[in-house]
Image: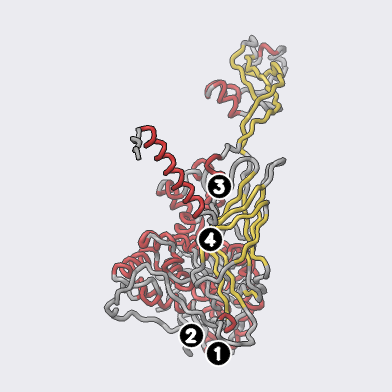
């Protein structure tokens, strides 16, 4: 049998055949795998050229004495040119001469216009025209919701297994959404059209990441949106070997800018941290009605203030109901009870309103006001602290730097808009000091000419600013943790502990918190409350521990004290906290530390809200 020699052409043909076989094999082996392709790589610009009509008005600036043409101006609005426009076209000197010109009025000395000094305006021509301008078109967007159940905050509980419902919107006429795509964890999904409903699997306590986008007939896609979704089944029904009559329940929480439902806490979005399953504890709750915030606490300082200002007559009590320090004695407190209860609850409606507007827990705000001022906003030896929350210069600095939306609204009230456009961090020191002082003064309710020496309208207004101050502190806490761990705050710490860290940041300052977090991580510990407070610097920083425990008080919480740390046992500093499911917490009304018989001393002004 004769063997045929293999030519170079044959080798080349065989190589092509072999490559084709390999490629075909790969295609067949992956035929069940869905590929997630977006049109983003070929996005056309969402721009449009439109024709608009306009009118040009030509104005001449002439001299009265000989009608000499001094300057020409072209504007596109009806009416006289504005002084700024005259300065732009003619220069500062000519503009000043024109502004200094008085009306030409005939008199015995002036019998004709040529005798008048100065300049006058003359409308030379009116010319209509058209021009083409480029405009940016609105992009498509995708929103998410929960289907098959109606989770109501704060529990967010479902009796049927929830599904994820996605809705895409295309704002351009004559265009439509082709498809919605995404991934739940590593599982890909795709739906035709502008709506999509997909099942949600049970997740761990830290949830699962969902990525989603939509493709448009315009030829582009939405941006890539993300969500962190937690679905926790509750009860024995999830155990396959156990027969039970338990009603199936699922707790559902969603963290995403695209979530259509109300989000209970804005800070949970900032941190990417889920609240406890079944809703937050009492001190971080936001009831729907002011009645749920009603308190009847025996505030000795508040009672003393009401007696001192003549709201309460305690003349029948020893010392007129007051101790030498100005706080009420026990008799004064009892006499002041009705007025005391009314006063401490008069701000509840506004606290609820602000909580709904900002997402800051209502009970948290009320607890802080209790600790800082005992609801008497007129008290402040230190003039640099104001409002129910005793906002200080440091607190004002935080809200102006870390809450850009608030800065954008507040700054133009004090400084020129062009200066505000630089941002708070880029302002001169004097400008920053001016804004800080103005903000503290704005929330201060001290008013010598007002009844009781307090402007209750300003006290109420301070609640909204204080909530935004807390949001700014949430942002700062998230950044401090990220700078240390390179992970989102919710990945390395729990929701409740993050709020405690925020209170440390508000009371002790970011230096106290950042130092403690750095030392906790470098020692090999997780970022829990118990671990972090062990690493707070002695002195002012550790005073904040009692401050936080007073605000987060409930029967289950013990006052923490720094102790010597044990040696770490191979703990990863940035490991995700491991929490076992527990029964959703019972709502407990937070109460402050019980007073002693001789009454509370007034708040310590050197450390906001701290008691000696």
Residue furthest front as drawn: 1
Q: Tag 1 or tag 2, which sits nearer the N-term?
A: 1
Q: Foreground mark, 1 or 3?
A: 3
Q: Is mark 3 on a helix, strand or loop?
A: loop
Residue receiving disc 1: 331
Q: Is residue 85 left or right of residue 541?
A: right
Residue receiving disc 3: 38
Q: What element carries label 4?
A: strand
The structure residue drawn at horizontal position 49% and vertical position 75%, both measured from the top left corner, is: 371
Q: Tag 4 or tag 1, which sits nearer the N-term?
A: 4
Mark-to-mark CA distance, 2 and 1? 32 Å
Q: Nearer the viewer, residue 197 or 136?
A: 197
Q: Is residue 324 left or right of residue 288?
A: left
Mark-to-mark CA distance, 4 and 3? 16 Å
Mark-to-mark CA distance, 1 and 3? 74 Å
Relative to 457, is 435 above or below?
above
Q: Tag 2 or tag 3, which sits nearer the N-term?
A: 3
């Amino acid at each position: 049998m004769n063997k045929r020699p293999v030519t170079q052409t044959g080798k080349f043909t065989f190589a092509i055949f072999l490559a084709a076989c390999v490629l075909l094999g790969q295609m067949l082996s992956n035929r069940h795998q869905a590929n997630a392709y977006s049109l983003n790589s070929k996005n056309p610009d969402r721009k449009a050229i439109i024709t608009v009509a306009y009118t040009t008005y030509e104005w001449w600036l002439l001299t009265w004495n000989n009608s000499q043409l001094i300057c020409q101006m072209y504007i596109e609005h009806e009416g006289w040119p504005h002084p700024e426009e005259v300065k732009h076209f003619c220069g500062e000197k000519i503009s000043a001469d024109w502004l200094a010109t008085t009306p030409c009025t005939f008199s015995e000395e002036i019998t004709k216009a040529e005798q008048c000094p100065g300049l006058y305006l003359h409308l030379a021509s009116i010319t209509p025209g058209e021009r083409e301008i480029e405009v940016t078109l609105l992009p498509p967007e995708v929103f998410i919701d929960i289907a098959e159940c109606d989770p109501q905050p704060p529990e967010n509980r479902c009796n049927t297994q929830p599904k994820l419902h996605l809705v895409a919107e295309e704002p351009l006429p004559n265009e439509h959404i082709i498809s919605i795509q995404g991934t739940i964890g590593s599982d890909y999904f795709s739906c035709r059209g502008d709506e999509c409903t997909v099942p949600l699997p049970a997740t761990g306590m830290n949830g699962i990441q969902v990525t989603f986008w939509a493709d448009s007939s315009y030829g582009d896609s939405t941006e890539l949106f993300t969500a962190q979704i937690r679905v926790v089944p509750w009860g024995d029904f999830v155990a396959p070997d156990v027969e039970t009559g338990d009603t199936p329940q699922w707790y559902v929480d969603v963290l995403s800018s695209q979530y259509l439902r109300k989000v209970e806490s804005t800070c949970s979005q900032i941190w990417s941290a889920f609240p406890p399953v079944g809703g937050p504890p009492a001190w971080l709750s936001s009831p729907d009605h002011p009645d749920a915030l009603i308190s009847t606490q025996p505030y000795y300082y508040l009672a003393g203030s009401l007696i001192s200002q003549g709201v309460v007559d305690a003349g029948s009590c020893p010392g007129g109901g007051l101790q030498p320090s100005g706080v009420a004695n026990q008799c004064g407190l009892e006499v002041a009870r009705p007025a005391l209860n009314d006063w401490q609850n008069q701000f509840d409606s506004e606290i609820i309103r602000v909580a709904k507007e900002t997402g800051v827990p209502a009970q948290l705000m009320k607890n802080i006001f209790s600790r800082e001022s005992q609801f008497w906003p007129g008290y402040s030896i230190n003039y640099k602290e104001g409002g129910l929350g005793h906002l200080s210069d440091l607190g004002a600095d935080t809200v102006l730097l870390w809450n850009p939306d608030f800065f954008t609204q507040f700054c133009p009230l004090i400084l020129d808009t062009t200066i505000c456009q630089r941002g708070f961090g880029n302002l001169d020191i004097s400008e920053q000091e001016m804004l800080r002082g103005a903000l503290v003064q704005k929330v201060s309710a001290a008013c010598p000419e007002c009844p009781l020496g307090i402007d209750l309208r300003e006290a109420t207004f301070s609640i909204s600013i204080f909530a935004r101050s807390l949001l700014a502190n949430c942002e700062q806490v998230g950044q401090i943790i990220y700078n240390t761990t390179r992970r989102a705050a919710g990945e390395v710490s729990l929701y409740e502990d993050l709020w405690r860290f925020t209170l440390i940041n508000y009371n002790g300052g970011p230096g106290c918190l950042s130092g403690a977090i750095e030392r906790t991580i470098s020692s090999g510990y997780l970022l829990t409350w118990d671990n972090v407070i062990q690493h707070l610097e002695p002195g002012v920083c550790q005073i904040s521990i009692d401050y936080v425990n007073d605000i987060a008080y409930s029967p289950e919480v013990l006052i923490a004290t720094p102790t010597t740390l044990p040696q770490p046992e191979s703990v990863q500093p940035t490991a995700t906290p491991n929490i076992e499911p527990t029964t959703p917490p019972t709502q407990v009304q937070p109460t402050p530390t019980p007073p002693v018989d001789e009454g509370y001393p007034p708040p310590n002004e050197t450390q906001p809200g701290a008691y000696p």
